[in-house]
Amino acid sequence: MANLKEMRLRIVSVKSTQQVTRAMKMVSAAKLRKAQDAIIQIRPYAEKLHEILVSLVDQNGSSDFENKYAVHKETKKILIVAITSNRGLCGGFNSNVIKKVEELLATTYDSYHEKGLVDILAIGKKAVDGLKAKNIAVSETVHKLYDNLNYSSAETIAQRLMDAFSNGEYDRIDLVYNQFKNAAIQKLTVEQFLPVEITEESGPDADPHHYFSNYIFEPDVNEIMGTIIPKSLKIQFFKAILDSVASEHGARMTAMHKATDNASELVRALNLQYNKARQSAITGEILEIVSGANALQGS
Amino acid sequence: MYLEIITPENKLFAGEAELVKLPGSSGSFEVLMNHAPTISTLTEGQIKVKDSRGNVAYFEIRSGVVEVKHNNIIVLVDASTSPE
């Protein structure tokens, strides 16, 4: 029973790990709330922008819009933007994104990948590490985005992507990220970022207030479209980032909750084992004393 | 009329307004009660808002879009900072 002390140490160490995971869970919960607030903040903007876009399309039809971001060219070069986090310990959050990218390369973009026509932009350190481990070349990385996440920093990256598209560097840009459903559920999403699909909301249930209020357009429709489309793209990108951040914290919270539960289970089992060992040590000792005393009496 | 000034990160203004002056791309313009429905892009400049009690507030913007519809004014602006 020499390992009684070892077991005691083990229990202490598991307990301290549990404390760490519990603290991390609390921190993630707080950060999650903040990230969720950011998503809620962006929602009215995104909705109104969409509304304006819809009323524009409504009145003018979507076919005659010419926009450099909506040009469907023959797809020659593809960019995949993998959005992950900078930190780990959040369950399958990052590895899911990496797996999806790998899958895309092996299936949908199979033929492009073989010719080296798929570039990957990794946002977050984990995407870089994970893809490197799978021998997938990452052409560009962005880490600093998360240090001080705000609209203008996301906008800068979005603008760069849009420029790369409009000057013909890429003919298609996809985003791979975790969409935020709730704290426990993240939905892995592959979203076409560019070229833009202008969806015309036609159909019976499209627009409840479908009246033609004859708008005055200043300066003119095409000009307005020219400003709104880049804006909505930037918003789409920013929203993807915010979703990913919220998902990250949600995933970490769940992972840490599980870790805490596992730790308490482990502590319980170890305590039981420890008490059994302690008891049998005591029993052994008593046995020795009693038999020693008996032997003395006998002689 | 009801005015909302929204950025991607927060709401700068939401409430009743009497007069809104906007830096439109083709010239500055004012919106009063019962203005015709309008969609316009905005350039860098200042939005002046006079609320129902006559208080005046200013917002600096870099760019934006405004929609005026049935006395509802929605201004979507980018990277604006209200002067401290």
Image: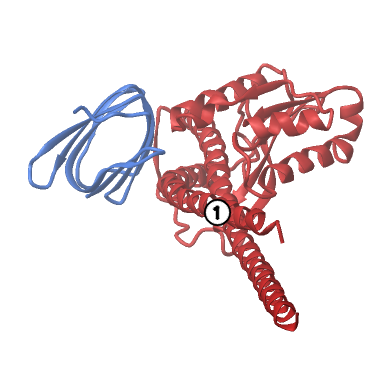
Closer to us: A114 or A168: A114
In the displayed structure, would residue B28 be above or below residue B52? above
Residue A135 falls left or right of residue A243:
right
- Residue nearer the viewer, A261 or A117: A261
Residue bearing mark 1: A253
- Give the residue furthest to the front: A299
Question: The chain coloured blue carries which letter?
Answer: B
In this view of the protein, which residue sits in the foreground, A277 or B33? Answer: A277
Indicate the position of residue A128 as horizontal and vertical percent values. Answer: 70, 28
Image spot of residue A279 (x, y percent):
65, 73
**Horizontal and vertical percent for residue A123?**
63, 30
Total labels: the figure holds 1
For this view, does A267 lie left or right of residue A28? right
User: Hey, which residue is sitting farthest left in the picture?
Assistant: B54
Give the quadrant of residue A205: bottom right
Query: Can residue A211 be seen here?
Result: yes
| Residue plotted at (71% across, 81% down) | A294
In x, y percent, where is residue B52? 12, 47
Q: Is residue A165 visible?
A: no
Q: What residue is shown at x 33% (from left), y 21% (from top)?
A: B44
Callout 1: chain: A
- In this picture, is A79 found above or below A266? above
Of helix, strand and loop, which one carries label 1?
helix
Q: Tell me if B28 is positioned left or right of A73 in this view.
A: left
Give the colour scheme shown: by chain
Instruction: Look at label 1 and name its amino acid.
Output: Met
* Chain identifier, colour red: A
- What residue is rendered at 83% in x and 23% in y? A117
- Residue at 71% from the left image edge and 18% from the top image edge: A168
Check disc 1: other Cα within 10 Å, few if <14, some if 14-19, many if 20+.
Answer: many
Is A141 rendered above or below residue B55? above
Point out the image quarter for the C terminus of chain B. Answer: top left
